[in-house]
Amino acid sequence: MDGNGRWAKQRSHPRVWGHVRGSAVVSTIVEEADNLGIEALTMYAFSSENWSRPQTEVRVLFNLLFKFLKKERERILKNNIRFRIMGDVSNLPEQTKKLIAQLEGETAHHTGLKLTFAFGYGARSEIAYAVNRFMKANPGKEMSEDDLNEFLMIPDLGDVDLLIRTGGDHRVSNFMLWQIAYAEMFFTETKWPDFTVTEFRFIIEQVAKRERRFGAIAPTANLETNVIVARENQRLIRG
Ligand code: FPP
C-alpha cells in the first residue's frame, strides 16, 4: 500500500494525512475482497524497516491499526472473516495488542476471507524464523520445501497468486518472498489513497487473463505434444 506520503505532499498536507486517507481505502478493499469471494487478502501495513520512520509517523500508523480494529470488528465478525496479524507486534501499545489477540481469538474458527495485516513484518526474518523453529523441532534433520512452508508465520495462507503494489515503484520490498515464487505481479502508478474498488476489480480481471505455467510449457503446447506422442505410439504399435 505505497504512495501515501507522496499523495499527501502533493496536496500540501503532512505525510501522515496520506496514511489516514489510506486506512479508509483499506476498509473498502477488504469489503470488496470479501464480496468477490477471494480466499486470502494480505495487506502490508507496516514493514520491519518502517521502524526507522519518525516516531510521530509510527505512532499514527499504530493508531490507525487500533481504530481499524475498533471500527471493523463487528463487520469482521458478522462476515465470517478470519483476522490475523503477521509480524512482530511486541512493540505495539498494550491496548492494541489486546484488541488484536481478542479479534484473532474470536475469528479463529471463521472460514471466510483470510484477512491478514503484515505489521512489523519482513519476509527475510519470517524465513529465518521458520528455519530456526524447524531446526529446534528437528535437530540434525535436513529441511525440505514442505518443512519451510509448514514453519512460516501463517502456513495456511499458502502461495500468493497476485501481488499488487501501488505508488509506481516496481519492487517487492521484503514482502512474502517465499510465498510469491509464482505470483503474478501488478504494479500501478496509483497512490494508495487513490486506489479504488474499480481498479482492484480491473487488476483481478486483467491478471485472470494471463496464462500461468508454473515453469511448465503452455497447455496448448502440452496438448500438441500429447497428440504427437499418441501418433508416434500408434505408429510403433502398427509397426
Ligand atoms: C507506504 O507509503 C505505506 C505505509 C508505510 C503504511 C501503509 C498503511 C496504511 C495504508 C494505513 C494503515 C491502516 C491500517 C488499517 C493498518 P509511504 O509512506 O512509503 O508513501 P511514499 O512512498 O509516498 O512516501
Image: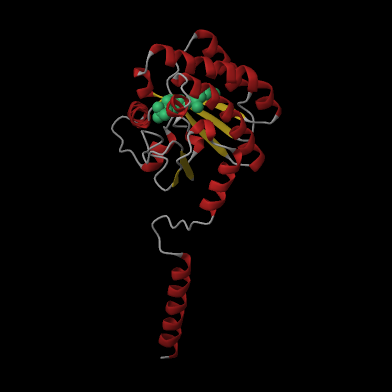
Q: Position of residue 92 (x, y in %)?
A: 46, 13
Regarding residue 45, the answer to whether it shows in the image is: no
Q: Image height check: is 58 above or below 128? A: above
Instruction: Tell me what residue is drawn at x 50 percent, y 37 percent.
Output: 157
In the figure, residue 214 lies in which quadrant? bottom left
- In-front residue for pair 183/222: 183
In the figure, residue 189 lies in which quadrant? top left
Q: Position of residue 148 (x, y in %)?
A: 38, 37
Q: Is 125 positioned to the left or the right of 77 in the image?
A: left
In the figure, residue 127 lies in which quadrant? top left
Q: Image height check: is 238 above or below 129? A: below
Q: Is 22 positioned to the left or the right of 134 in the image?
A: right
Instruction: Tell me what residue is drawn at x 33 percent, y 31 percent.
Output: 124
Furthest residue to the top? 94
Furthest residue to the bottom? 239
Colouring chosen for the image of the structure: secondary structure
Instruction: Tell me what residue is drawn at x 45 percent, y 83 percent.
Output: 231
Q: Is 159 positioned to the left or the right of 114 in the image?
A: left
Q: Position of residue 32 (x, y in %)?
A: 63, 37
Regarding residue 124, the answer to whether it shows in the image is: yes
